[in-house]
Image (spheres, grey):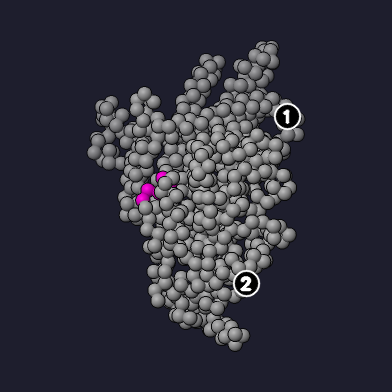
């Protein structure tokens, strides 16, 4: 707002100024919020709410203070952050694969979709903690159970969105494909997948954030020995609140970074898709 | 005796009426009853553990009433979960509070600890490491490189077990501790997901009698035999604001501890009610010790062990943490 007041309207500013503006716009709220957080927690002086500067310090010492030969990652970091990310990556990849494949199949058959939809809605609504006892009977403690519990929740958004996307292909395009006598495979590749892609990505984005949340949950399960969720509950039991907050902040940062990566991938995938459509038109 | 009890009841009644009237008038520390703060009202968060039996004995035997106390008990699953409530003043005392967790909380500045009463001490065979009957683990030394399930990692279980193993020339750093809640330990052991489990009663008796599991380490042996494990804790803020209330509570629990220590039948009677231990199981389980006094030398053992295991940053003065009423 102050920029509007100082700069004369209609006169383009330099590139540097515009870059600065975009950075400011993006980070101003964050910087202000972090400042208020620091000030508030310092004023409160409560062990339960350490100031962000102390949290960042703890994060640095705990995870990133090792030598360059270890890529600055301490033992604590490689022992907890990496296993967590590994679990999450495997579970997210499985969710995406199963979700997209099943979703494509189901979305193309109105009848099967109608049959299984209630079951999916039912299964989707079950919170994983509620079926931990079942997991414990069916599976061995450790990675199998952890990955399964993540996939169990993260698969639904991809599956249901993909099915939705595959169902709602423009009828005119379907007709055109028929006129051009496209083979089923070509139809899938050139028509159905591209037109479902925006919805698939919407589903993937939901699944990604769910995977991160459930990664923490999966590491609270019996049989856990490492991971960020384990570090979190361990720090809680020791009343080590700076560590609790360090894990919370790291989870937030991970959520932000992973979402940014997915958005970049989405932009590339959909840009191709949009460009292709533009050429066709 | 009876007339005395009736008198107490009347006094408590008046105190309650007074406090409820006072409550209408706003913030008022009613000093009726036995001259206790808050009209003798005290809120205790309690765990469903054998450790806290004295609390329920005191309630059943009206020992609290005799001190002019009106105790309301709120059940919790883990003592550390009640910590924020204790700090915020929603709860005044936590019964069955694990010393390791609370000494760490005090050490981290999360609260200013005051121990009102000792609750339980470690006895032989109340918390053991068990394996399946056909396990290749025959002696403590065989545990090296194997997994041992504990309820909460880096807490009282690994602290005491490490000390026992070290005394038996076993290297505790080679033990792989895995977090498995007590109720799920038996099942995980059956499936072979874990090599051994550090179980407490009543799960321990259950595993031995129903599944035929074998004990490899007595978790209550030297050098941690008779070590304090849990107690009745509060905060410095509470005890300095309510010294008479805290003292009355301490007296009532001390009497109940003596009953628990003297007659295990009294403990068995209260267990089905709050600890969900069936009445037929209660007589067969191994009980912890119920100390009948508050002893700083005894409590010092916990601090020393924790310091040796680097679970504490500083060396707390146990005398200042133990509540002693001003006479």
SS class, disc 1: helix
Q: Which residues are magenta?
A: B310-314
Q: Position of residue A173 (x, y in %)?
A: 63, 20
Tell me which residue sits at (37%, 33%) in the image: A64
- Which image quarter: residue A93? top right
Say if B22 sits above or below B123 in the image: below
Tell me which residue sits at (47%, 52%) in the image: B100
Q: Residues within 10 Å of mark 1 (few under 14, many from 20)?
A: few
Kindly identify which chain the residue marked by label 1 belongs to: A
Say if A277 sits above or below B234 in the image: above
Q: Position of residue A246 (x, y in %)?
A: 41, 41
SS class, disc 2: helix
Kindly identify which chain the residue marked by label 2 belongs to: B
- The CA distance from mark 1 to mark 2 is 65 Å
Q: Is residue B217 magenta?
A: no
Say if A117 sits above or below B248 in the image: above
Left or right: residue A63 compared with residue B198: left
Q: Position of residue B46 (x, y in %)?
A: 56, 61
Q: In front: A15, or B92? A: B92
Name the residue tied to disc 2: B60
Say if B175 sits above or below B161 in the image: above
Disc nearest the viewer among 1 and 2: 2
Tell me which residue sits at (65%, 62%) in the image: B271
Residue A110 numbered mark, or none: 1
Most extreme residue toward the bottom is: B3
Q: Is residue B313 magenta?
A: yes
Residue B150 numbered mark, or none: none
- Which image quarter: residue A116? top right
């Amino acid at each position: 707002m102050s920029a509007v007041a100082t700069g004369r309207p209609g006169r383009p500013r330099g590139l540097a100024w515009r870059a600065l503006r975009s950075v400011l716009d993006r980070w101003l709220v964050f910087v202000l919020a972090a400042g208020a957080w620091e000030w508030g927690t310092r004023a409160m002086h409560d062990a339960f709410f350490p100031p962000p500067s102390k949290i960042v310090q703890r994060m640095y010492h705990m995870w990133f203070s090792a030598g360059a030969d270890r890529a600055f990652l301490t033992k604590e970091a490689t022992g907890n952050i990496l296993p967590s990310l590994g679990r999450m990556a495997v579970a997210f990849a499985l969710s995406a694969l199963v979700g997209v494949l099943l979703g494509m199949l189901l979305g193309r058959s109105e009848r099967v979709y109608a049959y299984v939809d209630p079951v999916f809605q039912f299964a989707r609504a079950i919170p994983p903690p509620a079926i931990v006892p079942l997991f414990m009977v069916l599976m061995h403690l450790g990675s199998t159970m952890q990955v399964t519990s993540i996939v169990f929740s993260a698969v639904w958004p991809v599956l249901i969105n993909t099915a939705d996307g595959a169902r709602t292909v423009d009828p005119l395009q379907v007709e055109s494909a028929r006129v051009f006598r496209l083979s089923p495979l070509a139809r899938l590749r050139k028509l159905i997948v591209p037109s479902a892609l925006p919805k698939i990505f919407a589903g993937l984005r939901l699944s990604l954030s769910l995977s991160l949340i459930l990664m923490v949950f999966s590491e609270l399960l019996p049989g856990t020995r490492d991971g960020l969720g384990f570090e979190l509950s361990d720090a809680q039991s020791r009343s080590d609140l700076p560590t609790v907050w360090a894990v919370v902040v790291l989870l937030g940062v991970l959520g932000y970074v992973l979402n940014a990566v997915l958005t970049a991938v989405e932009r590339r995938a959909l840009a191709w898709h949009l460009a292709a459509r533009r050429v066709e038109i | 005796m009876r007339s005395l009890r009736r008198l107490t009841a009347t006094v408590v009644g008046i105190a309650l009426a007074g406090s409820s009237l006072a409550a209408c008038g706003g913030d008022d520390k009613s000093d009726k009853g036995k001259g206790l703060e808050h009209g003798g009202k005290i809120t205790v968060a309690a765990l469903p553990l054998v450790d806290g039996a004295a609390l329920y004995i005191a309630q059943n035997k009206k020992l609290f009433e005799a001190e002019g106390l009106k105790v309301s008990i709120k059940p919790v699953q883990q003592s550390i979960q009640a910590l924020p409530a204790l700090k915020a003043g929603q709860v005044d005392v936590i019964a069955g509070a694990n010393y390791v967790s609370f000494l760490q909380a005090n050490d981290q500045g999360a609260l200013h600890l005051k121990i009102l009463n000792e609750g339980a001490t470690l006895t032989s065979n109340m918390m053991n490491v068990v394996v399946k009957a056909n396990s290749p683990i025959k002696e403590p030394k065989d545990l090296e490189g194997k997994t041992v399930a504990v309820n909460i990692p880096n807490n009282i279980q690994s602290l005491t077990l490490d000390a026992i193993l070290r005394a038996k020339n076993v290297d505790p750093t080679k033990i792989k501790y895995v977090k498995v809640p007590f109720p799920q330990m038996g099942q995980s052991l059956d499936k072979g997901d874990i090599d051994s489990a550090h179980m407490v009663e009543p799960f321990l008796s259950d595993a031995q009698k129903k599944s035929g599991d074998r004990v490899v380490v007595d978790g209550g042996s030297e050098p941690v035999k008779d070590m304090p494990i849990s107690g009745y804790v509060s905060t410095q803020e509470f005890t300095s604001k309510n010294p008479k209330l805290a003292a009355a509570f301490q007296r009532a629990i001390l009497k109940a501890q003596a009953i628990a220590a003297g007659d295990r039948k009294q403990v068995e009677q209260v267990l089905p009610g709050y600890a969900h231990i069936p009445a037929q199981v209660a007589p067969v389980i191994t009980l912890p010790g119920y100390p009948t006094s508050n002893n700083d030398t005894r409590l010092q053992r916990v601090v020393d062990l924790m310091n040796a295991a680097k679970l504490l940053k500083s060396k707390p003065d146990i005398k200042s943490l133990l509540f002693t009423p001003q006479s």
